[in-house]
Image (cartoon, grey):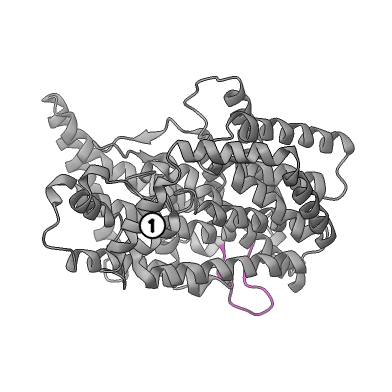
Amino acid sequence: MKAKPPGNTLFVPFWRRSRQNGTKKRTMQNLQEPITIPWLPRPLLVGGIVGLTILASLAIGHFAAQGSLMMVAALAFPSLALMGALFAIRYLEFLVLVLPVTALAMRFAAIPTGTESPLHISLVLSLGLVGIWLVTMFTHGDWQIPKTSFNRSLFTFMAICCISLPWGILWRDPILNMAAMGNGFPITQTASLASIVISMWVPYLVGYYIDREWKIKFYLWAFVIGGTLMTITQILEIEQYILTDAGLWGLWYSAILFSVILVLPGVAWVWRAACLGLLGMHMYLVVILNSGWLSGWVPGILGIGAIIFLYSRKYFFMLTLALVLIGIGPAGFYIEEIIAAETEEGGLERLDIWERSLGIVAQHWLFGMGPAGYAPYNMTYFPWDARSTHNNFFDVVGQFGVLGLLAWCWFMGTSLWFGWKTVNRAPPGFLRTVAIIATGGWVGAFASMMLGDWILPFAYNQGIKGYPYTVYSWIFLGLLVSVHRMLDAQDAG
């Protein structure tokens, strides 16, 4: 009699997972079963596919002979897309591993769209993987979306984002100068909504498929290697078009290194010293060389403070006291110089932009003006100074209204509470360290929303081309979900 697989499905190979303990559990093997069409006979289905393939091949040969490359590409795209989809369905959980690599180290990989916002490969990959995952679950009638304490708040915010698009068009001011936005403004709005919504699906995708410690380590090593190369190339002023050294990469790089130094047990002193050296080099870059760019170092400092708080309240109190004493001393003059330089460069002009933005929001407060919707209002009412808010909170209320802002604040609270609970239930070790990295980093990420569009890209600032670096934070929220699910599996085992 064959031995039954262990009850903890987390450590059973995906091709051997099956129904265990008498419960009906859909597995990767089940999800990869062929999708059938009950109302279409199999011979007719196969014959139709063969016939369409022959016709498409003849048409491609005809247009290729005439030199019409656009028609050849249009005819070949469905077949290539179908082949890619079949490949992704079979190897979905392994393709999820590629996500951080495409975001960190494939800056050059973008599909031109004829506009200033190309589709980056990380966005295309996220759309494909999430879409295939949802369609597969829907087809088999088995939803495998991880359960978290922020599901309701995040899905509510997604729904409000979708409602805001037709709402903003329906209640758009009739005197707006829409000609200034060009004919592609509806496409821009739709693409902006898609990039925002797909970002919020990434945590569930990562949380479901990154279900081994080695996969989490692969993600962390990708950020450590990528962050080290970004730091070195920026210090040496080396121009490169491979690494995506923008957004909050410094926040997550610092959070990983600092957590290895402080939190992770059993690390040899050589590795702690190496992490300390890398962290010092990075701080020299962002705090000394690039001190004027507050988004480059303020979120990282706040994230490190949150990590210390999660690890030890005593250490946090000692750090706070030390910072107060340092701020009173010579460091205080350095901080004053940074603030003065930021003011001279127009940092306080944002207050005027925010005031104008709130004036428009007052007339469209319920669901806002839709994705990228406040751009034509600025172009019409303030054409001499039509700028984005450079603040995610004002972006949220402008695009998705007061209801959207309330839902987003709800999500902020529930996601941080989810991280707090995960940290407290995890025993000292690797999983607790990852939970502290993700939760502490999210504190810094939420603070960065006051400084720019670093979590939810605005179409006329970061644009959809900024997706590869705005997705960084959502990836780490997914790792937090992974840790929570692995702890559940350990408890069940």
- Residue 429 image-quadrant placement: bottom right
Q: Is residue 77 above or below residue 404?
A: above
Residue placed under numbered mark 1 in the picture: 395
- Residue 340 image-quadrant placement: top right
Q: Is residue 428 left or right of residue 288?
A: right
What kind of secondary structure does the magenta stretch mostly adopt? loop
Label 1 SS: helix
Give yes or no for residue 45 being in the magenta stretch: no
Quadrant holding the N terminus: bottom right
- Residue 296 image-quadrant placement: top right
Which segment is the magenta one? Answer: 17-27
Q: Is residue 416 left or right of residue 401?
A: right
Residue 85 drawn at (x, y percent) = 39, 49
Give yes or no for residue 19 being in the magenta stretch: yes
Quadrant holding the C terminus: bottom right
Camera-nearest residue between 287 and 63: 287
The three-letter amino acid code for the residue at tag 1 is: Asp
